[in-house]
Image (spheres, coloured by chain):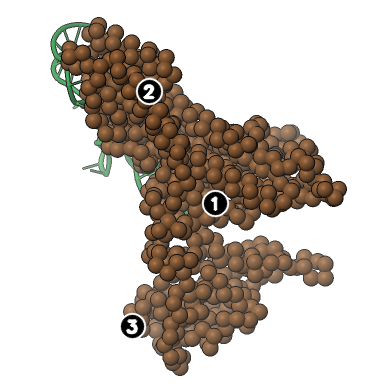
Chain colours: A brown, B green
Amino acid sequence: MRWSQYFIPTTKETPKDATAASHVLMLRAGLIRQVAAGMYTYLPLGYRALRKVEQIVREEMDAAGAIELHMPVLQPLSLWEETGRVEAMGDVLLRLAGPEGDWRPNTVLGPTHEEVITDTARAYLKSYKQLPINLYQIQTKFRGEARPKSGVLRTREFLMKDAYSFHDSLECLHKAYKTMYDTYCRIFGRCGLPYVAVEADSGAIGGDVSHEFMVLTPAGEDSVAISESGGYAANLERASAHPAPPQTDEPLPMEEVHTPGVGRVEDVCEFLGTRPEQMIKTLVYDIKALRVVDGKDVEWTGWVVALVRGDHEINEHKLERVVREAFDDEVVLHFELATPDSIEELTGAAVGFAGPQGLVERVDKLIVDRDVTTMRNAATGANKTDYHVRNVNPGRDFPIEGDKVVVADIRMVVEGDLAPNAEHDPLHIRTAIEVGHVFELGTKYSEAMHATYLNRDGKPRPLIMGCYGIGLNRILAAAIESHHDDGGIIWPMSIAPFEVIVIALDPRDETVMQTASRIHDELVNADLDVLFDDRDERAGFKFKDADLIGIPLRVIVGKKSLAGGMVEFCHRRDDEKQKVTPAEVVGLVVKAVGEELAGLGRAQAHDAASVL
RNA sequence: CGGGGCGUGGCGCAGCCUGGCUAGCGCGUCUGCAUGGGGUGCAGAAGGUCGCAGGUUCAAAUCCUGUCGCCCCGACCA
């Protein structure tokens, strides 16, 4: 491809609205153009890279035995009503506007395709003999994101590979899950991403087992905890740490202290001369739920109190999980940090003076963080405005067992905590981009949508499902986040829009142009993706552009070298120029491309520590 | 949705506070000449409803009101 005949609108200046490195470079290198918030045009260079990612994903999915199909973006609202996800998705689910009674208000733009695939499955997958099967598509998704950000990292329209597997047993699901997990490792490895697979929360999609594939970068929106050895890696939403060692001090008598106007943990510490890790934070939550009494739904409201150490933060994802489990046979409608009025009503004290003593009778659940149960002589609120107590001891001054008490891990892991299964393996917390997510869904969708097959005994059973997603646009952004320098992008060979760029430095020199042109043609004949910078520009300008768009290999044809019968060959990543003859350069390029692709293809599931 | 910031030729910005001349500057674009190994120099030129609507005023990019859009932080998020 001749640059002069192509369309690569590069810019020298940094676009004002971009902050993330990948966003800046994608704009500057002419890969994308923003059309509106969260909506982007992929310009030719960007689209080439995106298609390469797509092709890698397709090859690996096919190799794993998954079968490609194509589902509609337009979906009937009724399918979403079947699974109750119209409410669960909220504003994320985009609905068409139109007069009442028209088809439009009953149509949505698909944010994901569990409902549509399950609808297909229930129509055709009627026998265990058809199972297992894994169906996938590469399809545009639409989501009403409240706040698109960081270029293509979070958009309202994006390209996703979504796969759905169907099984007649959990064992079979586990097997498929493992296959997809390994396939994802191959895909991200081939794309040149320094990724890490972490244990994940399954969120609104549902299900139990789940892993996310993360690429560590400051531009990411997720936080992950990774142990130094790489033996443990989890999304911060679900990460847990080794329990704190039990304290062994002799319990002292509980003592009330007047602490006028001192409510915050730090202030109390200063006032009492203690440290946050010797305090107990008492957090009050309002809960509203439905319970079935005499066959009728009865709505009730109450309180849940959660205790964590003063130096710890509550992890609301974990807490909510524990709460839902604790109220297993009820439907939790509302669960939120209590209002000041509600806290006062429960504790009889102003906010900031709550303590666990004597509360258990008045609340519906007392949830005690594991690390609180082993504290000795702690300080906490006295349930009396302007008073705290010290020498509070779990088990003595408030219960850590019983009907209403749940002891669980509900705190946020912090930098330096030890990994849950190791004594000497500190955790590091990093931000990351989620590029893929695999779930074991189970029967959530098949039950809701009555998607059943007949087993060997001729009995109808709900299909057991797994689902597996990859954000293709994010792969591009993550690759750039991971591979760039001050000058621009440094593409991994596998997803580079072109594998090699031939630069004619003196385009008005006939010999230069002929040589460069011949090398270009030969490289094209060798089946490589070649960009030929034949523009009538000065050398520096072309070098800067080449750096910016980040084509991995570079052949430089200039008057000076050519006078000695040589051209130059170098890699974008190190810029170490090698003088070779025009005759041998083609072979060198072909070899370098092959080696680099092979290297990426060998990229294995590496351990998490390698990305720290 | 809450908080903050910003809308001025294709891009990046100044001017606005304190209203007033022909709305400036850099990049890019076009023409010519020179230059030709790391975003080249000189000369000339084209290109702007100052986001939009209303108001105040003799006069609005500038002041006021409303509205739309974009970015950042937070909430939310398969």
Residue sitting nearer the eye, A550 or A16: A550
What is the three-letter code of the residue carrying label 2? Val
Q: Element under label 3?
A: loop
Residue sitting nearer the eye, A191 or A91: A191
* Residue A433 against residue A32 in the figure, above or below: below
Disc 2 designates what residue? A590
Disc 1 designates what residue? A211
**Residue A174 x %, y %:** 64, 51
Q: Element under label 2?
A: helix
Outermost residue to the bottom: A253
Q: To which chain does the residue with label 1 belong?
A: A
Q: Tell me which corner region of the image, top left, top right, bottom left or bottom right, holds residue B27.
A: top left
- Residue visible at 44% across and 41% down in the picture: A603
In this figure, what is the number of numbered marks?
3
- Residue visible at 37% across and 25% down in the picture: A591
Disc 3 designates what residue? A273
Q: Tell me which corner region of the image, top left, top right, bottom left or bottom right, holds residue A486.
A: top left
Quadrant where the N terminus of chain A lies?
Answer: top left
What is the three-letter code of the residue carrying label 1? His
* Residue A510 against residue A7 in the figure, above or below: above
Q: Which of marks 3 and 2 is nearer the N terminus?
A: 3
What is the three-letter code of the residue carrying label 3? Gly
Give the side of residue A207 with respect to residue A538, left or right. right
- Residue visible at 60% across and 81% down in the picture: A401
Q: To which chain does the residue with label 3 belong?
A: A
